[in-house]
Image (tube, grey):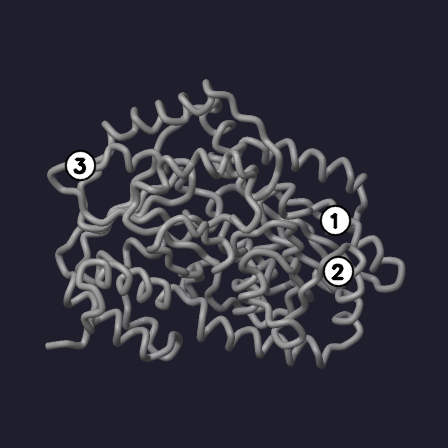
Amino acid sequence: MLNEYVGIAPKGDLILIKRLCEKLRGRDFLHINSTRAGGGVAEILQRMIPLLQELGINARWEVIEGDKRFFDITKKIHNALQGFTEVLTEEMWEYYFYVNKENSSKIELGADAVFIHDPQPAPLVKFRPSKRRGIWFWRCHIDLSNPQKEICDRLMEYYNEYDASVFSVSNFAIGEKSLEFIIPPSIDPLSDKNVELTEKEIEDILSPYNIPLDRPMILQVSRFDRFKDPIGVIKAYRNVKKYNDCILVLAGSPATDDPEGEVVLNEVKEFAADDPDIFILMLPPFSDKVINALQRAATIVLQKSIKEGFGLTVSEAMWKGKPVIGGAVGGIPLQIIHRVTGFLVHSIEGAAFRIRQFLNSPEMIKRMGEAGREHVRENFLITRQIRDYLSLWYYMETGMKSVFEV
């Protein structure tokens, strides 16, 4: 499988991955998160785990189970860590711990390296096996640049138990531990969401949705989450529509660990007010080919987040040579180099201005699209993330010893 990336991913990444796997072959690498569908974490693991297995690593992916009450609590924690004010009672914290305790008896936690993804399964570190402790990492994918202090402080009870932590962006790091590493997420260029599609395939995939493909399309693909600002996207579109003919598509999929999705979706539908040129799609999980076709059919792609851990849809669209406009928050500025690979914006008015600038300048669309694709190739493909994860694991076991040492 790794050979399929030859000519696509940087050659150095492929060489280093092979050498690292020679050193770590037969070792156990466990990942645990809270959902198998919906969101970037699940998407990355769906592609990464088989690749690691093919390379000789005993990679496993486990998902914790929880009821609505548990995920309501963890959504509050998620929102608070991203700066929204939430109140969690002592009873809520106890239930959060209890659900993780129940999961600890169902999941084999013994492994040489364990990655615990995001806050939902964070307390599992308290149940780390004594006989086979391994190296435990807390992998945080969300924007921790301005967390609610009370909630963040409470999570330190678990955070400080880990051997190291991994963040997507440097200003997300909490600064409470000496071992904190920065590893941005990635996309898989060979997945159904990112492989090349012909014009005929795009038309056939999108035909059931009755989206006109003969007019400029503004697209945002994301969960229906207030932090993604779908209402702001509609406001920007309406500003643009006064001057430029275009349509707007808002597409997303549900996630089992996000209980607010349906509420936000209904708010968006109400705000759209049956505008015939606004298409709101709640796609079923694993609608990767539909998202691929939408991104390839789009004229301009938005990710107008007001808080964002990384935003894989930015790299997905850039890989397809699309001009992208994103909120200047979280991990988006890592991907969008302002005025080079796209535009960063701070307001609805700014987003509308940049949309019109693109619509009125096809040459700019082409130039930034080409620059964006190369930026993703060099920095945000899954081979780079596998390289970084294996390098971190190897470093934690051996110190600064070179992987190329005989």
Please rate how many residues cluster around mark 3, counting C-alpha atoms within 10 Å: few if below 14, some from 14 to 19, many from 20: some
Residue identifier under label 3: 129
> Which secondary structure, mark 1?
helix
Residue under pointer 2? 351
Q: Earlier in the sequence, mark 3 or mark 1?
A: 3
Packing grade of label 2 (10 A; few <14, some 14-19, many >=20) is many
Residue at the spot x=64%, y=80% of the render?
367
Q: Which mark is in front, 3 or 1? A: 3
* Residue type (three-letter) at the residue carrying disc 1: Gly
- Name the residue: 67% across, 55% down: 304
The residue that disc 1 covers is: 232
* CA gap, disc 3 and disc 1: 47 Å
Q: Secondary structure at mark 2?
A: helix
- SS of the residue under disc 3: loop
Instruction: For label 1, count other residues whose C-alpha is less than 10 Å away and answer few (under 14), some (14-19) or many (20+).
Output: some
- Return the mark for residue 62: none
Answer left or right for 157 relative to 305.
left
Q: CA distance from mark 3 to mark 2?
A: 50 Å
Q: How many marks?
A: 3
- The outermost residue toward the right is 242
Q: Earlier in the sequence, mark 1 or mark 2?
A: 1
Q: CA distance from mark 1 to mark 2?
A: 9 Å
The residue at 23%/58% (across/down) is: 396
Give residue 214's position: percent from left, percent from top: 74, 64
